[in-house]
Image: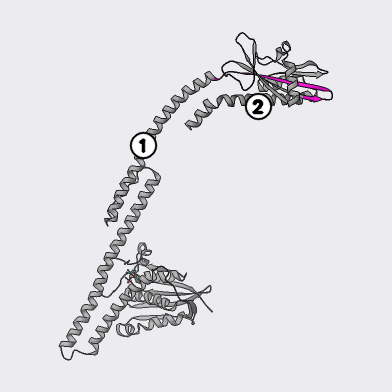
Amino acid sequence: MIVLLWLFQTVFLDMIYGAVKKRDMKNCASDVCEITLDGDLGDGVVAAAKKYDCCVSVYSIEDNYGELIASAHIQTACIIHRLEDNNLLNEFYEEAKEHGSYVKRIEIDLDGSEKIVTPDKRSGSDPSTVIYAEVTSEGATDYLVLVDSEIIPISATTRVLTYQLIIITALLLVASVIASIIISRRLSRPIEKMTKEASVLATGRYDVNFEGGSFREAKELGDTLNYAAGELSKLDAMQKELIANISHDLRTPLTMIRGYSEVMRDIPGEMNAENIQVVIDETTRLSSLVTDLLDLSKLTEEGAVINPERFSLTETVREALSRYSHLVEKDGYDITFEADRDVYVVADKTRMLQVVYNLVNNAINYTGEDKKVTVTQTEEGGKVKISVTDTGEGIPEDQLPKIWERYYKVGTFHDRGRVGTGLGLSIVKNVLTKHGASFGVTSKIGEGSTFWFELPISE
Ligand code: ADP
């Protein structure tokens, strides 16, 4: 900006001033030409002269004889009204007639006498006047329009401007240095601090606090980093808890298997079906835990694919429920399935079985004293909805969105009856999302929960 100011206010000022003057004179001349041809001179010439701040004379020229027919005398230092004294009038006429227009600059000496110079030899320091001539003809008559404008030397003005510009430049430089120091302090200091905090975060310490300062962008960065640190610490805590849970879950069945096996080996008569069943049950528990972990890691892998096929969803639910027949018989669970007819869907059968199995498993784990679990199949708008309802404690509303997260468990209890890794619902969510299916949960504290999902029916 400063460079532009310097260029326009000093270097180009003279040029621009001259160009503006010349343009004004040209416009004034063409206005006057129009008025002349209209034949209505009078006040028109004066108005044009006033408009452009120039002096104007109009001559009609016939048979080499020129007669002044209109004139406007606006500026005192003009010379077109004194042209008859020298032979310039003739020159203007000849030149303008030949070229359409003619410009001449005349410098005025201090004693008032004129000194004629060509336009390109302007000294710039003496007052001068520029005369612009234009010829227009009508019939045998030529009209010579002369426009005169005083050129005031601007070197003095330029000096004043230069002086002002020096002051402005100095002030601006000081102001911009101060502004940049303030800005860089307020912007770069917080960023430097945040960089340090981020390297602390990278070492695994999550108790860092990112302060972005007062600039919006830096503040937003600080907030985002704080959020990321919070999420990382949550994930870290969850993973630690998961490892603790998994090791506990792995160790308990292993201890049982080992204990029972040793008893059966060492004590005669203990090798009975009941004890062997305990070993088998514990092995099943172990294997389902490992399967859950593997499933989830497979499902969350990039590019995990589903293999859709057409199958009876109703039959799949029955199949999942049949796995619990021994629970029904042995522990008195009341598992019911309500379906009007067999409904077919196109989906990955193995994965859907897994979804139903996980939902029913949770319902059994978390249902109330009455050990009741109800699975229902309903149809609406071309979709089949499977709902799994239990009569358990229910899930607090603020926890509802979180239960679908990996490793998430409501509360931190960990009792033997509820073997949970916090992975089941995460697997359910992954499978159903991959199928584009809608799913959800409604729950009431003390009354139980209903988990559901919907798939389009394939008739
Ligand atoms: P888990 O293997 O621990 O059951 P899930 O991912 O299946 O893991 O479930 C996450 C958490 O959601 C559970 O720990 C439990 O607290 C809660 N939850 C899931 N299903 C039910 C249910 N039917 N009733 C009450 N709470 C449930």
The colour scheme applied to this rendered structure is: one colour
Residue displayed at 73% across by 22% down:
95
Dot 2 crowding, Cα within 10 Å, few <14, some 14–19, many 20+? few
Give the residue type that dot 2 points to: Arg
Query: Can you say which quadrant of the picture contains the C terminus?
Result: bottom right
Pointer 1 or 2: first along the chain: 2
Taking 204 as reference, is 349 left or right? right
SS label for mark 2:
helix
Instruction: Kindly tell me whether residue 210 is visible in this rendering.
Output: no
Mark 1 or 2: the one toward you: 2
- Residue 347 horizontal/vertical position (percent): 47, 76
Whether residue 252 sits left or right of residue 131 in the image: it is left
Q: Does residue 137 show up magenta in the picture? A: yes
**Horizontally, is 309 left or right of 210 in the view?**
right
Stretch of the chain drawn in magenta:
136-154
Residue behind mark 1: 182
Residue 35 forms part of the magenta stretch: no
In terms of depth relative to the viewer, which is nearer, 131 or 2? 131
Where is residue 321 shown, x and y percent of the image? 38, 81
Q: Amino acid at mark 1?
A: Ile
View quadrant of ligand 1: bottom left
- Which mark, by number, is residue 5? none
* Left or right, residue 435 beside residue 105: left
Query: Dot 1, crowdedness within 10 Å: few (<14), some or many (≥20)?
Result: few
> Nearest the camera: 26 or 365?
26
Which percent across, then down, holds residue 327?
32, 82
To which quarter of the image does residue 393 belong?
A: bottom left
In the rendered structure, find residue 23 and report the number of the disc placed on it. 2
